[in-house]
Image (cartoon, rainbow, N blue to C red):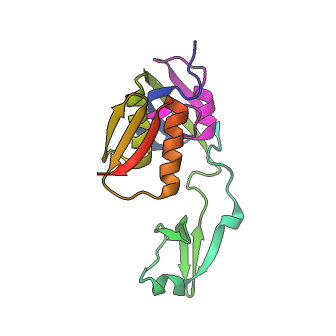
Amino acid sequence: MGLKKNDVINLSVKTYTLEGVKVEDSKKTIPLGRGYVVNKLDKLLIGKQVGRTLSEVVDKPFGDRVQELIRLIPAKLFSRDKINPYPGLVVNIDGLIGIVKSVSPGRVMVDFNHPLAGKQLKFDVKLIKQVVGKEDQAKAIVENFLGKDFKLVLSGRNIDIKINKAVPESIKNKLVNEILEVTGLKAQISLQ
């Protein structure tokens, strides 16, 4: 029987452009079918067996390039924030991440498309092992949200997540919901 949605799996992902340029080489522990990897790849992993290695070409996993996401921004917005824009600079404008494409007097062209939008990518994925312990599953989910700076305390069907820094309520709510849906554990988050 193959892997199904919400199974937590340890995997290795190598991502390449079709020209052979490596984009990513990482190990992840994720619940399947929940958007922790690009949607098209997430769907491909459902039904596969642990120990298997897949090599798949996915057409535009980050969507199409959208011309409307390439914008001219007044240069004064950058100088106001004491930023000297140059091609290749990654910027955050009104919560959108973009890359400066060109700079001319008074204007800066910024591309808010994902850098890999419109490209076909090749994914080499090794399904290393399935994580079955509820505490280990919860730990993997928390690491995907918050990194490694936390402590878990399991008590029956409840899990307390102790963190060192404040986290927005929306993130806390999403994290608590993910843990409940994937593991069945009721989670609460508190500062250490």
| Residue 32 lies in the magenta stretch | yes
Relative side of 163 to 174, left or right: left
Viewer-nearest residue: 80 or 115: 80
Would you place residue 109 above or below residue 104 in this image? above
Quarter where residue 56 is shown: top right
Place of residue 102 in the rendered image (x, y in percent of width and height, measured from the top left): 55, 74
Q: Position of residue 32 (x, y in %)?
A: 55, 31
Q: Is residue 161 magenta?
A: no
Identify the residue at image location x=64%, y=72%.
71
Which residue lies most toward the top here?
A: 1
Q: Residue 157 occupies which quadrant of the picture? A: top left
- Which quadrant holds the N terminus? top right
| 147 and 57: which is toward the camera | 147
Residue 28 visible to the viewer: no
Count numbered badges in the picture.
0
Residue at screen point 59% across, 64% down: 112
Res 45 quadrant in image? top right
Q: Is residue 86 above or below residue 105?
A: above
Res. 173 visible in picture: yes
Residue depicted at 47% across the width and 59% down the height: 168
- The image shows residue 58 at horizontal and vertical percentages of 63, 36
Where residue 16 appears, x then y in whole percent? 51, 40
Q: Which residues are magenta?
A: 28-56
68 left or right, relative to 184 = right
Frontmost residue, 68 versus 28: 28
Residue 183 to residue 175: above or below: above
